[in-house]
Image (tube, helix red, strand yellow):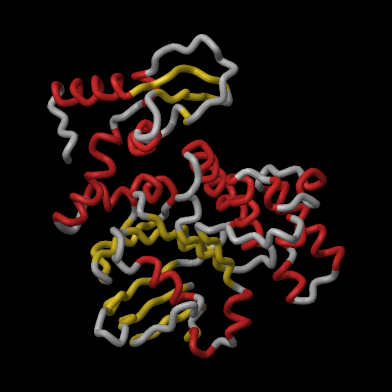
Amino acid sequence: MISFENVSKKYQDGTAAVDSISFTVQKGEFFVLIGPSGSGKTTTLKMMNKLIPLTEGFIYINGKKISDYNIHELRWNIGYVLQQIALFPHMTIEENIAIVPELKNWQKDKTRKRVTELLQMVGLEPEVYRNRKPKELSGGEQQRVGVVRALAADPDIILMDEPFSALDPISREKLQEDIIHLQKAIKKTIVFVTHDMNEALKLADRICLMNHGKIVQVGTPEEIIHHPNNKFVKNFVGKSTSLQSSFLLEDILTPVEDKNQTPTIPVSATLEEVLKELSTQEEILVEKDGIAVGTVNRQSLIQYFFSELGNGGNVND
C-alpha cells in the first residue's frame, strides 16, 4: 500500500531529519510511528502526502511513485488528522465535514447522507450536531469531527499526527477506544504518529520505532516488547511499560462519598496520565462507566511506589 525505499530528508545545513529509511505499510494496517522528539516520525508522515518533499529515495502508494501523482489526486485520497484540530470556526460541523466531498463535486444529497453516517459512526447525534459551530463542542467532540472529516470522501489512507495528545485523559481514552472500533468497521490503512508507547501498544498492528532519523525496529507490539532489537528499544519500551504495565488505578483508590462530582480521570488511566493530573492538583476524582468510584492523591501514589520497590520493582526502569 505505502512503501518507502531508502528515503531521506536533508536540509540545507546538512541536518538529516530522516536518514535512508525503508518500510512498507500493508493495506488495512494500523501502523504506528513512534520515537523521541526529533526522531523523524512526523517528517516521515508528512512526506507521504507531500507536505514535506523528500530529498532522496522513493515513496510508492499502490505501486505508483508519489511524484507521479497529481498533488490534488494524492491528497484527496489521503485523510489527515492533526493534533491541532483546525476546524473552520465560522462553518457548521456539517460544512466542516463536507469540505472535501464538495471539492470533489459530490451531489448535496450524497454529501448530507455521508455526514449523517459519519456522525453516527462516532456517537454524535446528527440532528443535534450538524448545525453547531466548533466552539459549541468539547475538545473530544471536536477531535471526533476532525477524524470523520478526514474520512468524509472515503479515502484509502488516513494519516494521524498525534491527534489525541492535547486532550484530557478521559477524552483521550475514549477516542483511543473509538478509533479501535472505527478501524474494525472501516478497515482503512492508518499511519499514526505518537510519542506515547502505551498508546502505540494499544492501537497498532505494527510499530515503527525511530531515533535520530533512522528506523530502529519495526514489529508487532508483542515483538517490540518481548524481542527488542537493542538496548535503545528495550529502554524506550521499558520506561513506558515496566511499572505502568502492572499499575492498576483501581487498587489505590480511596472511596468517595459524593458520587455526583465531575470525574477527572477514568479508572483505566495509565500511571503517566495519573502523574500528569497530580502534577497540578492534590487529589483527583476517578470514574468508571460514568460514575465516580474513588479518589487518588499524591500520598497514595507515593505509597504505591514504595510498595512496588519493596516487591523488587524499580521506578527508574
Residue 37 position, x and y percent, is 30, 61
Say which of 29 and 118 sits in front: 118
81 left or right of 284? right
- Seen at 68% across and 42% down, the residue is 123
Residue that extends furthest to the top in the rendered view of this protein: 257
40 left or right of 136? left
Q: Is residue 55 above or below residue 269?
A: below
Q: Is residue 313 above or below residue 14?
A: above
Residue 213 position, x and y percent, is 27, 71
- Seen at 74% across and 75% down, the residue is 103
Q: Quadrant of residue 88?
A: bottom right
- Seen at 77% across and 72% down, the residue is 102
- Seen at 43% across and 19% down, the residue is 295
Residue 125 position, x and y percent, is 76, 43
Q: Is residue 20 above or below residue 162?
A: below
User: What is the number of callouts on the image?
Assistant: 0
Residue 238 position, x and y percent, is 22, 45
